[in-house]
Image (cartoon, rainbow, N blue to C red):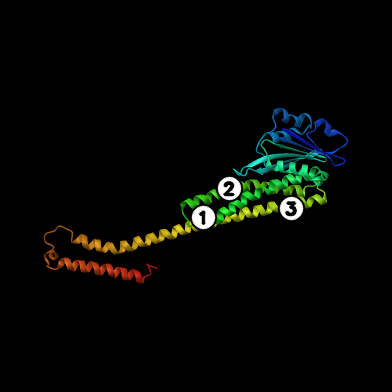
């Protein structure tokens, strides 16, 4: 589907006009949105607008890294919006010229829908021009990164309150995977904003530059949040490993104490369990009770000795 919006010189918004009317002298600027276009609509990029074949190829083949390409009369941008369910990026391609902006996306984009609605409702946006629409689109795309990251932070806060176990560690590693997905989307977008702000070929008026700087600040904040959450997952993982190690040490200490006590007792019992006829102690009247007393004395002595050595602390 192709949606067209045009603003006249007297700041009136026209919707769904034919493409040929966009060249009228009374059109100040226009926005065309290619939403899940079919093959015939895709050809309009070449036949009507005569965009560069490489830019058109980037539109057709997903998934390109966020980038900026310069062409004569316009700039081509690849942006990544975020699928809130899968956390995978979805490509939005944008052509920006002096008096036009063209968006192209093969899947529905809630961010573009919201910007379209604002354009219809707010007259001040209609007066701004194509570059401001580009800012609004980028700003909305970046704003939609925050909910996913806030949810991850809430999940991590809940995990910190729970006792460490194997299931908990599976949740932590799942969160690390989600953070990695967000990182692969947000860092390239941050690099793109940095390039836009420092490019001599992308002309951004002073009154618009502050808006783009605000988006860049948001991306910096998002990057810092991702890194801090990744460090938190590392801390949770290390705490789990340390706790397991300490638990294992306590188990080994308990087994060692039991072994230290029962090894000499087993030795004594094994001697008197041998079936020799000429063992002198076998004929003692009180031999059985004497051996039990010796075994009890040895066991208690070992317990007292290990306790003094601090093995039960």
Q: Residue at x 79, y 30 (%)?
A: 48
Residue underneath mark 1: 237
- In whole angstroms, how far apart are the C-alphas of marks 2 and 3? 25 Å
Residue underneath mark 2: 178
Q: Residue at x 61, y 56 (%)?
A: 228
- Between disc 1 and disc 2, whose residue precedes? 2
Name the disc covering residue 214, or none: 3
Q: Nearer the viewer, mark 1 or mark 2?
A: 2
Picture quadrant where residue 75 is located: top right
Residue that sits furthest to the front in the current view? 121
**Position of the C terminus by quadrant:** bottom left
Picture quadrant where residue 55 is located: top right
Q: Residue at x 56, y 47 (%)?
A: 177
- Of residues 51 and 121, the one nearer the viewer is 121
Q: Nearer the viewer, mark 3 or mark 1?
A: 3
- Of residues 8 and 274, the one nearer the viewer is 8
């Amino acid at each position: 589907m192709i949606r067209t919006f045009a603003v006249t010189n007297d700041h009136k918004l026209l919707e769904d006009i034919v493409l040929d009317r966009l060249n009228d002298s009374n059109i100040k600027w226009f926005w065309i949105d290619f939403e899940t276009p079919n093959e015939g609509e895709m050809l309009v990029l070449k036949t009507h607008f005569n965009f560069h074949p490489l830019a058109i190829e980037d539109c057709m083949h997903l998934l390109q890294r966020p980038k900026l390409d310069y062409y004569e009369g316009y700039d081509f941008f690849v942006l990544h919006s975020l699928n809130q369910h899968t956390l995978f990026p979805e490509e939005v391609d944008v052509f920006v010229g002096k008096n036009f902006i063209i968006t192209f996306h093969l899947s529905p984009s809630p961010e573009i829908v919201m910007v379209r609605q604002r354009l219809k409702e707010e007259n001040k946006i209609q007066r701004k021009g194509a570059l401001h629409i580009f800012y609004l689109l980028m700003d909305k795309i970046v704003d939609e990164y925050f909910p996913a990251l806030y949810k991850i932070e809430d999940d991590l806060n809940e995990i910190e309150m729970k006792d460490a176990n194997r299931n908990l560690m599976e949740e932590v590693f799942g969160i690390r995977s989600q953070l990695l997905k967000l990182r692969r989307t947000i860092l390239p977008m941050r690099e793109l904003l940095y390039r836009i702000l420092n490019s001599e070929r992308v002309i951004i008026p002073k009154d618009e530059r502050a808006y783009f700087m605000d988006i860049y600040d948001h991306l910096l904040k998002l990057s810092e949040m991702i890194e801090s959450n990744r460090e938190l997952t590392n801390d949770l993982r290390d705490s789990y490993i340390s706790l397991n190690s300490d638990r294992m040490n306590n188990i080994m200490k308990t087994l060692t104490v039991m072994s230290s006590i029962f090894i000499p007792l087993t030795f004594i019992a094994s001697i008197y369990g041998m079936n020799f006829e000429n063992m002198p102690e076998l004929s003692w009247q009180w031999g059985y009770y004497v051996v039990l007393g010796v075994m009890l004395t040895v066991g208690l002595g070992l317990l007292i000795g290990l306790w003094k050595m601090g093995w039960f602390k």
